[in-house]
Amino acid sequence: MQQPVVDYSRKWYIMAAAAMSIFLATIDGSIVNVALPTLVRAFETDFATVQWVVLSYLLTQTTLLLSIGRLGDMIGKKAIFIIGMVIFTLSSALCGLSPTISWLIAARVLQAVGAAMMLALTTAIVTEAFPRAERGKALG
């Protein structure tokens, strides 16, 4: 039985998209920390409430990673990854347009769902995009 021929010609484009998604999803978990005092003033709320902007993102993302990885195996990694990118992008816009702290926290939860969809599948997608001999170079 012959193995199917795999086209590796787009491997570096896939690697670039994967690297950018990891960068965005990871930095988004902590970059908002510098804005917390400003959010307290802007939304006229207490610091404990504003901390949920960070916590909701991190809790949602870590909770979903394993189940989304399995979902990618069942449905398809590329489809879930692209849906995750769309969710992440749209919810990032929602974060910027949030009129209240509650809206911001809800948008951060959605953003974390998209981030988890990207993070959970990136390694598997990169592994499939590179031939076995080059995977060490791709995964670092």
Image (cartoon, rainbow, N blue to C red):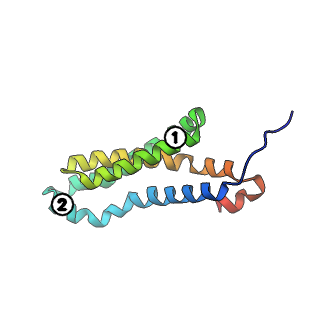
Kindly identify which residue carries mark 2: 40
| Mark 1 or 2, nearer chain start | 2
Mark 2: few/some/many CA within 10 Å (<14, 14-19, 20+)? some
Q: Position of residue 130 (x, y in %)?
A: 70, 53
Kindly identify which residue carries mark 1: 80
Cβ atoms at labels 1 and 2 below 8 Å apart: no
Q: Is residue 124 above or below residue 72?
A: below
Looking at the rendered structure, the secondary structure element under dot 2 is helix
Give the amino acid type for the residue marked by disc 1 in the picture.
Ile
Q: Residue furthest bottom?
A: 34
Q: Residue furthest left?
A: 44
Give the amino acid type for the residue marked by disc 2 in the picture.
Val
In the foreground, 105 or 99: 99
Q: Residue drawn at (74%, 59%), measured in percent from left and top?
A: 134
Quadrant where the C terminus is found in the figure: bottom right
Q: Position of residue 38 (x, y in %)?
A: 21, 65
In the foreground, 59 or 109: 109
Mark 1: few/some/many CA within 10 Å (<14, 14-19, 20+)? many
Q: Position of residue 43 (x, y in %)?
A: 16, 56
Q: Position of residue 19 (x, y in %)?
A: 55, 59
In the foreground, 21 or 116: 21
Tell me the distance, in whole angstroms, between the alpha carbons under discs 1 and 2. 35 Å
Q: Residue drawn at (52%, 45%), measured in percent from left and top?
A: 81
